[in-house]
Image: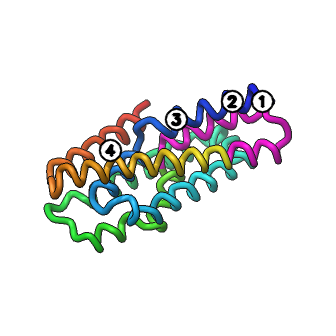
């Protein structure tokens, strides 16, 4: 089981740590309002992935495998929400309080359930790694807690990197719009793969 868990943890680190819609959105939040003000958003991201992992661990992935139309519908709804969330920051001079509201827990908690990359990583974790971990109870504990801890670390790091960029390029509309375009590009890429 130790080997299986190390393999799962390595997979989670690579998948959560690499660029994707959630990391780019949290980086945008860090650039605009900083890590401290994005804390609720980050906690929301973690809670949303916990929900997604529990659903898949309890069999929702099997339902999607049998209902291709539902999977496709969720994929397009997910992409539209990610693009909407990123594009809300397009304005020239964002007000800190208005921007802080879009990077709160409520918005964060629905990002991963609507994130195409999150769906792929959760499906792969549950189908390729979880079965070797033992009973369903053990699988739920190890998969869910591992994702949560790794997410907390990497989403915070991405947010801090965004904060650093925001301080370095203070008030740069190009930075904000560049991060938005990058986020939309990653979402579209995830949609077509």
- Of residues 14 and 84, the one nearer the viewer is 14
The mark lying in front, picked from 4 and 3, is 3
Residue receiving disc 1: 2
Q: Quote the CA–CA distance across marks 4 and 2.
A: 30 Å
Contact, mark 1 vs mark 3 (Cβ under 8 Å): no
Within 10 angstroms of label 1, few (less than 14), some, or many (20 or more) residues?
A: few
Mark 4 to mark 3: distance in Å?
A: 16 Å
Labels 2 and 1 touching (C-beta < 8 A): yes
Q: Position of residue 96 (x, y in %)?
A: 26, 70
Q: Which residue is mark 2?
A: 6
In this rendering, position of residue 44 left or right of residue 88? right
Q: Going from the N terminus, do you reach mark 2 or mark 3 first?
A: 2
Q: Judge the density around disc 4: few (<14), some (14-19), many (≥20) Cα neighbours within 10 Å.
A: many
The residue where tag 3 is placed is 15
Looking at the rendering, the stretch of residues picked out in magenta corresponds to 115-144
Q: Residue at x 35, y 38 (%)?
A: 186
Secondary structure under the numbered disc 1 in the rendered image: helix
How far apart are labels 4 and 1 at the CA level? 36 Å
- The residue sitting at 60% across, 48% down in the picture is 149
């Amino acid at each position: 089981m130790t080997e299986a868990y190390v393999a799962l943890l390595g997979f989670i680190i690579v998948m959560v740590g690499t660029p994707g819609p959630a990391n780019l959105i949290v980086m945008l939040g860090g650039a605009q309002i900083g890590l401290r003000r994005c804390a609720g958003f980050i906690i929301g991201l973690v809670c949303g992935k916990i929900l997604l992992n529990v659903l898949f661990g309890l069999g929702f992935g099997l339902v999607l495998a049998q209902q291709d139309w539902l999977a496709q519908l969720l994929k397009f709804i997910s992409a539209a929400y990610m693009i909407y969330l990123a594009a809300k920051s397009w304005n020239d001079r964002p007000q800190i309080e208005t921007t802080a509201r879009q990077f709160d827990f409520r918005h964060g908690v629905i990002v991963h359930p609507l994130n195409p990359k999150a769906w792929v990583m959760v499906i792969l974790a549950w189908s390729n790694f979880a079965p070797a971990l033992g009973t369903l109870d053990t699988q739920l504990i190890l998969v869910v807690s591992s994702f949560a801890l790794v997410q907390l670390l990497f989403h915070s790091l991405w947010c801090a990197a965004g904060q650093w960029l925001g301080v370095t390029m203070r008030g740069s509309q190009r930075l904000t719009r560049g991060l938005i375009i990058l986020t939309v590009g990653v979402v579209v890429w995830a949609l077509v793969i």
